[in-house]
Amino acid sequence: EAQFYWWLGHVTMLTCGTLYYAKRPFGWEAANWFYPKALLGALISYAIVVYKTYGPPQANLAFAHRLIVDENVEYLVLAAYWYMNRPILVTLVPFVVFSLFHVITYIRSVLIPTVFPGVTDEIERARRQEQQQQQQQQGAAAATALALSTPARVSKAIGDWSTKYYSPALREVGVWEVAVVCVWVTLGALTFQTPLFAPFAYFQFLRLRYALSAPTRAAFRRVRTALDKTLTPPTASASVPALVADSYIRVRDILVKMGDTIMDPSTQQQQQQQHRQQRQN
């Protein structure tokens, strides 16, 4: 079944990605063996999702547009790009986090009910009984904990943990993609430690994510707020040189304009018309 191979791809990413970071402090040669294996797992998983969603490729613009605006396609292309280049330390973190939640969710929703068929009904009965107890007691006392089988407790624990940490994890991944990976590949290209094309490829990925993903836009806002507080008056430290603050403000304003253009392409068209009119005058 395709879903099982999708899960194995995420297991591969989670396992090899974790081993990559675990072995990295002990030497890059041993760790780097796991880097492409991890990305291969991601490629398998995302390719399966994309194929199940859209079917065989079609040679028309409508099909291409649907692919471009799909986040699974965006991460598939990004994983393929990282796979074709030498390892970059920070790039696996988002994929590992995504795979962690996919792996445990599949365990909870598919594997455990398959091996223990009564678990789902058991948890649902316990949930309804707990709600009834809470309504009857009207908050006067805590509801009595109901006994669950070990598989049911494991399944419930996985569900509760995922519910609690999934959204916060996605927010932190967004910040990591914006503040860490972006800076890392840029500085790496300037110092010839990463491919020179890497920043341009990654900026295009972020451009699409900014246009299509509210969490990514929120991550940009968080990063900007933190940098404004650190580098600009009146909250900046007196030890921050004026040149650094001024340079940051210039770069920030350029990026803000780019973001406004991405969200409202008519702004760019108006600017182009103004430039043409100025040249004609």
Image (spheres, rainbow, N blue to C red):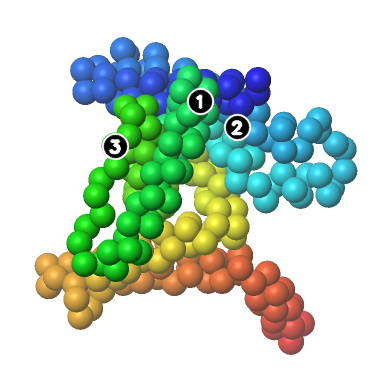
x, y percent for residue 132: 38, 57
Task: Find disc 1 in the rendering and name its residue.
Answer: 117
**Residue 89 in view (yes/no):** no
Callout 3: SS: loop
State left or right for residue 80 relative to residue 232. right
In this figure, which residue is indicated by the disc labeled 3?
147
Q: Residues within 10 Å of mark 2 (few under 14, many from 20)?
A: many
Q: Crowding near pointer 3: few (<14 within 10 Å), some, many (20+)?
A: few
Disc 2: which residue: 46
The alpha-carbon separation of the residues under discs 1 and 2 comes to 29 Å
Residue shown at the point (46%, 43%) measured from the top left: 124
Residue 76 quadrant: top right
- Which residue is at 29% across, 68% downward? 138
Looking at the image, residue 111 sits to the left or right of residue 274; the answer is left
Residue type of the residue flagged with mark 3: Ala
SS assignment at label 2: helix
116 and 7: which is toward the camera: 116
